[in-house]
Image (tube, rainbow, N blue to C red):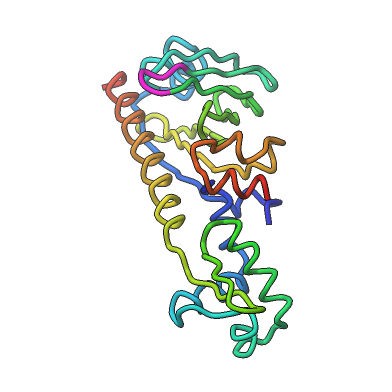
Amino acid sequence: MVPSEVFAALADPTRLEVLTRLASGGPATATELSASMPITRQAVAKHLVALDAAGLVERHPAGREVRYTFDPGPLGDLVKWVENVGDTWDRRLERLGRTFG
Amino acid sequence: MHGDPSDNVSVERSITLPAEPDTVWEHLTNGSLVGDWMEGEVSITPRPGSPITMTPEEGPVVWGTVEEVIPGRRIQWSWRTDDGLPTQVEFELAPVEEGTTLTVKETLLPWTTTGLPPRWIDRTSPSACLTAAA
């Protein structure tokens, strides 16, 4: 998954709340999630579509509804990207520093 | 959601070098000097709109465009690897007692700002391709 899309999916506080509830409360449908949140089922469903596009949830069709589970995989990709870029600049700046040493 | 660059993931590092800002500037804008520490062959013209390319010692060529230049103070460009992600790189130079503090910040850009489809950005990821096709 594209790390920037993962981050964008997490940038909305309500969407992050939906994801947090899935991660802590286990699999749930949009109806179940909306029952304990101050937003409509439609609003929850929209956030779930965005989370699905970012690869942060998995869809499991259950009758007329879809049950969602949290998928932590893309978070690891994002962390890995940040680590790699940080390591690269550490190495480059150290090399630059040596030319002035 | 994609509007404000400050919403995006970024990595920032700094180093203080025992040299005047103008000397450090040379090491940021003279291709052969940049290549020495960037670990690759770099072609750069410090002028907004000019291309920048880097052929790393390992991995695909990185290419992009210089966006902002304030000689001796600041240079910014955006680039992307052939199989990687678009990012923005900002360098700022500040004179300090010991010489010059150089700060670099690399920010992940959303693919939507580049006008490129996600499958182009991350063609190795099957889920990204599915997302693009959906």
- Give the x, y percent position of residue A54: 57, 56
Toward which corner of the image does residue B36 lie, by quadrant?
Answer: top left
- Give the x, y percent position of residue B33: 42, 13
Say if residue B87 shows up in the picture: no
Say if residue A81 shows up in the picture: yes
- Give the x, y percent position of residue A79: 40, 52
Q: How many marks?
A: 0
State the residue in front, A24 or B37.
A24
Magenta segment: does it hold B56? yes
State the residue in front, B95 or B106.
B106
Magenta segment: does it hold A46? no
State the residue in front, B3 or A24.
A24
Horizontal side, residue B115 vs residue B60: left or right: right
Q: Main secondary structure of the magenta part?
A: loop
Identify which residue is drawn at 31% across, 20% down: A100
Figure quadrant of the N terminus of chain B: bottom right
Identify which residue is drawn at 42% across, 50% down: A77
Which stretch did the figure color magenta? B55-59
